[in-house]
Image (cartoon, grey):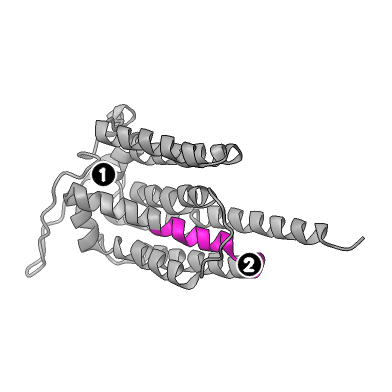
């Protein structure tokens, strides 16, 4: 049951989020988001990306767009209205899966300094996990899309900086390690928080057999451990590419 507010505790009003009210678990798989404006934007975005990318990069673009469809069209969108842990998966798909795919599109002839993109992407991720900002984003559709676009956009900027590093392996390794560290720290803070922090997820988790605090702890663990896997995979691919390039440049 939902806890009554303590004396003097701030009461935060909540509204229906963009992805709708939390669905009943038995009906979850039928809750696809068929918002015509969203579907039109995804279709136009996919066509625009396909028009400006080389044939060799079309698969990267298609994979990135598929991840966006999973995040915003599939029942994951509705589930993220119910569970904060689903929202954590949603954000990881944006910043650690879709963003690096989009960042690999186009040329990377110019090196991008890593410091500012890292600071902006990190600040953006942390800002939208402040309970008041998160609640505001779910209360207002415009803020919701500002949250999503800023998370994706700042992450693309970060990954482009990583991929453009001249001394690829050292610079990329340090940058990715720093990104993993800040993500893990945020996850740890959520995992060990003494109480549930997000008003939108105070009641719905019970229908899924979990209380709000455990749902929040699960979200923190997802950001703390599984979220590191895409970063580790990308670091490994960069290391392999750098090693191969160095090997081919060795004199005979």
Residue 35 visible in the shown view? no
Residue 97 drawn above or below residue 175: above
Q: Which quadrant of the structure image shows residue 244?
A: bottom right
For the point 20% across and 56% down, the residue is: 135
Q: Is residue 135 left or right of residue 193?
A: left
Residue 167 lies within the magenta run: yes
Residue 108 visible in the shown view? yes
- Tag 1, which secondary structure? helix
Q: Which residue is mark 2?
A: 166
Q: Which residue is mark 1?
A: 81
* Residue farthest toward the right in the current orientation of the protein: 252
Q: Position of residue 129 (x, y in %)?
A: 30, 61
Q: Which quadrant of the structure image shows residue 126?
A: bottom left
**Which residue is more in the foreground, 43 or 210?**
43
- Mark 1 crowd level (few <14, some 14–19, many ≥20, 10 Å Cα): many
Q: Position of residue 26 (x, y in %)?
A: 29, 29
Between marks 1 and 2, how big is the CA–CA gap? 42 Å
Q: Position of residue 207 (x, y in %)?
A: 25, 40
Residue 84 lies within the magenta run: no
- Mark 2 crowd level (few <14, some 14–19, many ≥20, 10 Å Cα): some
For the point 26% across and 60% down, the residue is: 196
Badge 1 or badge 2: first in the primary sequence: 1
* Residue farthest toward the left in the current orientation of the protein: 7
Residue 206 drawn above or below residue 35: below
Q: Nearer the viewer, mark 1 or mark 2?
A: 2
Residue 94 drawn above or below residue 170: above
Magenta-colored span = 154-170
Q: Which quadrant of the structure image shows residue 39?
A: top left
Q: Position of residue 148 (x, y in %)?
A: 32, 51
Q: What secondary structure predominates along the stretch shown in magenta?
A: helix
For the point 65% across and 57% down, the residue is: 238
């Amino acid at each position: 049951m939902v806890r009554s507010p303590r004396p003097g505790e701030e009461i935060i009003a909540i509204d229906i989020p963009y992805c709708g009210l939390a669905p009943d678990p038995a009906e979850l798989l039928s809750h696809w988001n068929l918002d015509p404006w969203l579907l039109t934007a995804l279709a136009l975005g996919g066509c625009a990306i396909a028009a400006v990318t080389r044939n060799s990069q079309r698969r990267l673009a298609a994979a990135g767009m598929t991840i966006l469809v999973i995040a915003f069209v599939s029942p994951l969108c509705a589930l993220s209205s119910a569970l904060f842990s689903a929202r954590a998966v949603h954000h990881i798909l944006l910043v650690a899966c879709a963003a690096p795919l989009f960042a690999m599109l186009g040329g990377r002839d110019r090196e991008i300094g890593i410091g500012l993109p890292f600071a902006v992407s990190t600040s953006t991720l942390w800002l939208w996990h402040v309970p008041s900002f998160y609640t505001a984003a779910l209360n207002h559709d415009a803020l919701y899309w500002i949250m999503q676009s800023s998370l994706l956009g700042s992450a693309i900027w970060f990954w482009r900086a990583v991929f453009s590093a001249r001394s690829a392996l050292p610079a990329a390794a340090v940058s990715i390690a720093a990104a993993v560290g800040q993500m893990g720290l945020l996850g740890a803070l959520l995992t060990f928080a003494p109480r549930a922090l997000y008003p939108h997820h105070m009641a719905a988790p019970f229908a899924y057999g979990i209380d709000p605090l455990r749902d929040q702890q699960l979200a923190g663990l997802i950001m703390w451990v599984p979220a590191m896997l895409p970063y580790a995979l990308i670091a490994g691919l960069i290391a392999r590419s750098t090693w191969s390039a160095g090997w081919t440049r060795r004199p005979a």
